[in-house]
Amino acid sequence: MIIWGWGRITRKIIGPAFQRICSHCNTTQIWRLCIMRTWFTLFFIPIIPYKKRYCVICPNCKSYIELTEQQFEKMKLAIASASNNNSISGNTVDESLKYQGKTETQINYLKQMEEYKNS
């Protein structure tokens, strides 16, 4: 009897990406850049990866925003340069990702709060 399956997902965390309020769990966390792979398994052992997704993930509830490979590489380079400086720079985050799913009023409010924190 051979036990096989698919759908096992592994996550490889690259590093912290940006701080954002999660729309699922309503917490403010530093989201992480990661690669998610879906595997074919044999006897519960991952054998062959058949799907690869690039995303930023909420550390609290594991919800994620899927990225293109170009966006992923851009953020990965930003994280690498920020880790060399030992800080996460707010300017390295793509604005369209940071404020994804927000209304114009919410975006304006969040930008004002960032300016208030920086002053």
Image: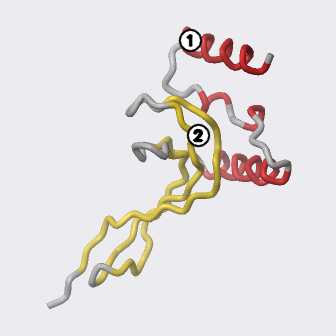
The secondary element bearing badge 2 is classed as strand
Dividing the image into 4 quarters, which one contains the N terminus?
bottom left
Estimate the x, y position of residue 24 in percent, counting from the top left: 38, 33
Q: In this view, does 85 lie to the left or right of 93?
A: right
The residue indicated by pointer 1 is 104
The residue indicated by pointer 2 is 30
- Dot 1 crowding, Cα within 10 Å, few <14, some 14–19, many 20+: few
Vertical comparison of 90 with 4: above or below: above
Residue found at x 76% / y 52%? 77
Q: Which amino acid does label 2 sit on?
A: Ile
Residue found at x 64% / y 53%? 15
Q: Residue 14, located in which quarter of the rendered image?
A: bottom right
Residue found at x 50% / y 46%? 57
* Residue mark closest to the camera, 2 vs 1: 2
Asked whether the beta carbons under mark 2 and mark 1 sit within 8 Å of each other, the answer is: no
Residue found at x 54% / y 49%? 55
